[in-house]
Amino acid sequence: MADAKVIPFGEEPRSRRAAKRARGRGRSSASPSPSSDSGSGAGSGLGSGPGAAAASGSHSLSSVPDQPDGIEDAMPDDKPRPDPAHPHPAQPEPHAAAPEAEGTATAEGPATPEDPAESGGSDWDRRLAEGFAFLRRRVTGDYEVDEFGYDKELTDQVLMSLIRPLYANYFRVEVKGIENIPSDGGALVVSNHSGTLPLDGLMMQVAVHDNHPAGRHLRLLAADLVFMLPVVNELARKAGHTLACAEDAERLLQRGEIVGVMPEGFKGLGKPFGERYKLQRFGRGGFVSTALRHGVPIVPCSIVGAEEIYPMIGNSKTLARLLGFPYFPITPTFPWLGPLGALPLPTKWTIQFGEPIPTDGYPPEAAEDPMLMFNLTDQVREQIQHTLYKLLVQRRSVFF
């Protein structure tokens, strides 16, 4: 027992770690020879036994802080091994939150729009700015009007906006065949006329303006009475209407405009309710002569729904003569209900533009041929009448 050594607490694990470190260094040494291994083992006194363990224990106390080899051997193979040169690798810094870019979604709420003009307030600001700019141009006279008095800016921004609720929400107009109106160049749109008041012309104008892919404008030919009424005269000119005469129609067609004409005139507008959707005479065919002179296509147009907005059950010719009107309508509500009786019934409308009839294949002198004009006029009239009957068969109800 005299040779026994008392190993302090905690010494044995350190010696073992030192031995493992020595073995690890022995394995990592470069090509050791067998003789050098045996010599180093005898001369150094690091053999087996308690004395060797004690000696190595004193050496391991000074080498504890290094500890890479013992740890390296004890670690599993699938774990990353630390670098001896850097025993304590730098831990990755927490990911710094990047500043939120405008227009990106956050955890607190939806994405903030990048463009301020997309927000509701900015949209109203833009509209107010455009409105003030419009008023400034009106006051200073900085706007364009063509030779007929047509004010495109006023029509697009004001007049169409006033008519559009009646078109879209009240009459709920359905448009068909808008592709039959050419995208460029002149054309003559010929339509039936009805409804006691000429609302069908206005609805047709909105239909072309809002639905044509090229954004074309319809220039209507109106009767003389329209330009004799106060206020109505000025508004009609601003909206692009002009006098229903061959001269004005030819000037518009030469400029490549879409011209609308309703050959029935007051005969179709003021016909009694019992003759609804029966086309009246188309006059002498002057619109056909105009189309032939300029070689523009004729586009037939059929309107269903306008006949029922004011069911005309009578005509007071005496009042019409006193007021200078072609007729004075009597309906189930007018004049019995006063101004309230002038409210049109909310019928469901359909406007269909038919296949265009070309005229560019005729010689220039064809415009003076009465038989040709009669045949083309009858062809246009029959096509409109046939389409009216077809739409009436397809219609489910007057109001739906």
Image (cartoon, helix red, strand yellow):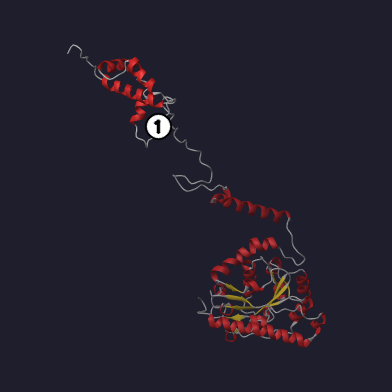
Kindly identify the residue that appears in the image at 61 percent across and 67 percent down. Answer: 163
* Three-letter code, disc 1: Arg
Give neighbour class at mark 1: few <14, some 14-19, many 20+ (Cα, 10 Å): some
Name the residue carrying label 1.
Answer: 81
Q: How many marks?
A: 1
User: Furthest-top residue in view?
Assistant: 2
User: Furthest-left residue in view?
Assistant: 1
Name which quarter of the figure residue 340 lies in.
bottom right
User: Furthest-front residue in view?
Assistant: 35
Q: Is residue 354 left or right of residue 63?
A: right
**Does 280 sit above or below residue 123?**
below
Q: Is residue 63 visible?
A: no
Name which quarter of the figure residue 265 lies in.
bottom right
SS type, badge 1? loop
Q: Position of residue 281 (x, y in %)?
A: 68, 86
Q: Is residue 361 visible?
A: yes
Q: Position of residue 253 (x, y in %)?
A: 76, 72
Q: Quadrant of the N terminus?
A: top left
Q: Is residue 75 left or right of residue 215?
A: left
Q: Position of residue 28 (x, y in %)?
A: 41, 26
**Does 357 sit above or below residue 37?**
below
Q: Position of residue 85 (x, y in %)?
A: 44, 25
Q: Is residue 47 left or right of residue 279?
A: left
Name which quarter of the figure residue 179 lies in.
bottom right
